[in-house]
Image (cartoon, rainbow, N blue to C red):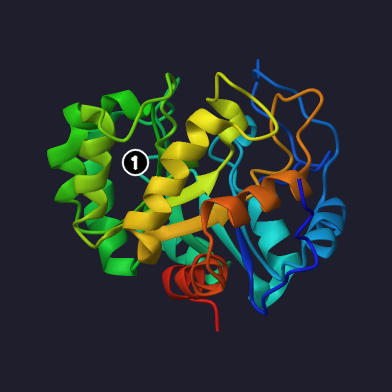
Amino acid sequence: MQATQNTTYAGACDCHVHIYEDKYPMVPNVAWVPPHLPVAAYRQVQKALGLSRAVIVQPSAYGFDNSCTLDAVAQLGEAGRGIALVAPDMSDTELKRLHDGGIRGVRYMMINPVLPWSSLDPMAARLAAMDWMVNLQLDGRNFPGHEEVLKRLPCKLVIDHNGKFLEPVKPEHPSFQSLLRILDTGNAWIKLSAPYETSKIGAPGYDDVSLVARTLAEKFPERCLWASNWPHPGRNPPPSEVDLYDLLFSWVPGDAGRKRILVSNPAELYGFR
């Protein structure tokens, strides 16, 4: 595979990064106990890929304590934004504090869920008033059952990892067609990211998931984002970020499309200036 890490775009953004700091306590019985992986370690990834912006996503290991994520966003300054994990009854005052700290959305992890589906509608109404987003991760095979709810959300919706179909699907599959209809609302975005989490074929090309990613980029370039998913929780050994970045260049053949996905779309969505 040809390395493309020397192809850089001013303002390019990695839209899904986790930061782990030893000084912040984790919730009991976490599924994966990460090593110390601070912002300084992630900056090496940014340097290797030529990226300048990042969205820090709250790890489930910290539960509702967003201190580590807020700290990471503060270290990144205007080049950083965050996605928090919040309890359904969080006060407006606390949401305002998170907003002032660079948070722009709430994470909904629906594989081993922390928040119930029943909290999504009322939370989305609160987020719409703040111009925040729901950052959703679910088994993509379940899109048809949630399609109508997701299409009518009043806030922006960002979907993780190519839809995260736990059994890779072809573009004509009903669950993938459901995802396309959600994106067609004009209020949803999707991350072209982490193919290793669902591919049955595996590296280097992840051909099954790459087919899905390529289709998404072709049909909805204005709705696509890119992310490394660094530091690849639970993966040992972890994949190469350079290889994952290279995949984007095979999914999106044109320079204009790549720049849109790496720069323009995240700048508009997350409010980078």
Q: Position of residue 22 (x, y in %)?
A: 84, 38
Q: Position of residue 133 (x, y in %)?
A: 37, 57
Q: Which residue is mark 1?
A: 88
Question: Which of these two is toward me, 207 or 47?
Answer: 207
The image quarter in which residue 113 lies: top left
Residue at the location (19% across, 57% down)? Answer: 185
The image quarter in which residue 165 lies: top left
SS class, disc 1? loop
Given the image, on which type of amino acid does mark 1 rest? Pro
Question: Which of these two is toward me, 18 or 12?
Answer: 12
At label 1, counting other C-alpha atoms closer than 10 Å, the crowd grade (few under 14, some 14-19, many 20 or more) is few
| The N terminus lies in quadrant | top right
Q: Position of residue 112 (x, y in %)?
A: 45, 20
Residue 84 appears left or right of 106: right
The image quarter in which residue 82 lies: bottom right
Residue at the location (20% across, 51% down)? Answer: 153
Q: Position of residue 92 (x, y in %)?
A: 36, 59
